[in-house]
Every structure is written in structure tokens, then in C-alpha cells.
Image (spheres, rainbow, N blue to C red):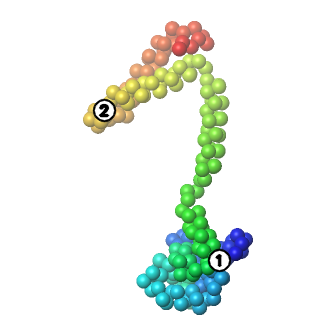
Amino acid sequence: MSAIELQEIFNQAQRHDEHIFLMPTKLVAAGYGVGESTIRRHKADKPGELLENQHWIKDESGSTLWTARGVVQLGFCTQSKQGNEFRAWAESQIMGALQPRESRSQVAQLDQTAQAIAAIIVGQLSAEQILQERINHHVAAALDAQIGGVEAAALGKSLALQWGLQNLASLTEAIASQLRPGEVRG
């Protein structure tokens, strides 16, 4: 069965929040290349393996609708090349539904965009602003290193950081007053 034929079958499936998708027996049978009676027989022969509300449900009219898990489980009963392909395709649909919304390539693209924005911002900073950012980073790291778990619980880490940043302003002013305009000391 071609990927296009598989996609046509999947397009006819009902999307479902809980079960990913639902398919009537006729559609499942077409996917596996067997008759509807074969699917019904598997359901009847394997009542302990094909469970209601997990592998299949009944609709308002009493017809059986197969869940994504049920379609995959039926694949273990149907031994044919087409059946194996259909089961593998159904598994891929399940895995696709379970993947996070952002793909790795989208996350990588967002990271590149963030880096480009950061480069623009840094390029527009003055030497004093860059120095201020570096000092802020080092003071925060030093405060984190000094404040242990017990002290942080007793004092509140945010209070300690706030105190450190208040004192940082006067420290930065003192350092900046020692520099000539545009000078940065390493």
C-alpha cells in the first residue's frame, strides 16, 4: 500500500483528543487489506487483548470505532505485508501525535534567531553597559556560590540577590568613574 493510500485512509479517520483517531471497521479492514469480517473475527477471538474503551469504542449508533491503539493491536493479528505496513503507519501516527509541538528544527531556528537578536543588542551596548552586564553576571554567580541551602532558606535567596544588586550599583559607579570614556579594562 502506498504512502498516498495510507494517507487517504488516515484522512477519513475521525480525529479524537483521547484516542488520537477513531476508524470504523470498514476503514481499518481497507488499511489491512482484509474484509470487515476478518476484523470482527479478531475482535471476537481476542476479547482479553482487544479491550473496549482502550482499543475500540461504540458510537451512538452502536457501531465499532477502532482507536489508534486498537488499529496497531489489530496489526499483530493480521499477518501480511500490507498489514505490517499499515500497523507501522498507525504507530507513526501515534508517535507523531505524542511529539512536542515544536520540532527540533523549529527550536534550532528559534535559537538562531535569539542569538542574532542578542548579537544586535550587544552591538548597541556601550562599554559601560557591557561592563555592567558582566559585573551583574559575576555578582549573581558569587552570591549563588556564597548562599548555601540553609542560608538561602533562612534569608531568602531573593533578598540576598536584591541586597547584592543594590550594592552593585554603587560598585559599578565607582568602577565607571575610574575609566575614561570608551575605555574597558580587562
The quarter in which the N terminus is drawn is bottom right
What residue sits 59% from the left and 70% below the top? 88
Where 162 sits versus 94, above or below? above
Q: Is residue 63 visible?
A: no
What residue sits 60% from the left and 41% below the top? 111
**Amino acid carrying mark 1 in the image:** Gln
Q: Position of residue 186 (x, y in %)?
A: 53, 14
Q: Position of residue 62 (x, y in %)?
A: 54, 89
The answer to whether mark 2 and mark 1 are in CB contact below 8 A is no
Q: Is residue 87 visible?
A: yes
Q: Position of residue 136 (x, y in %)?
A: 47, 25
**Amino acid carrying mark 2 in the image:** Gly
Provide the secondary structure element on which disc 2 rests. Answer: loop
Q: Earlier in the sequence, mark 2 or mark 1?
A: 1
Left or right of 56: which side holds 110?
right
What residue sits 59% from the left and 53% below the top? 102
Image disc number at residue 82: 1
Q: Position of residue 77 (x, y in %)?
A: 53, 81
Q: Nearer the viewer, residue 24 or 77?
A: 77
Q: Nearer the viewer, residue 135 or 173?
A: 135
Q: CA distance from mark 2 to mark 1?
A: 62 Å
User: Disc 2 vs disc 1: which is toward the camera?
Assistant: 1
Residue 25 sits in quarter: bottom right
Q: Which residue is mark 2?
A: 148
Could you classify mark 2 by the number of other residues whose Cα lies within 10 Å: few (under 14), some (14-19), or many (20 or more)? few
Q: Nearer the viewer, residue 53 or 42?
A: 42
What residue sits 61% from the left and 13% below the top? 182
Could you classify mark 1 by the number of other residues whose Cα lies within 10 Å: few (under 14), some (14-19), or many (20 or more)? some
Residue 81 sits in quarter: bottom right
Provide the secondary structure element on which disc 1 rests. Answer: helix
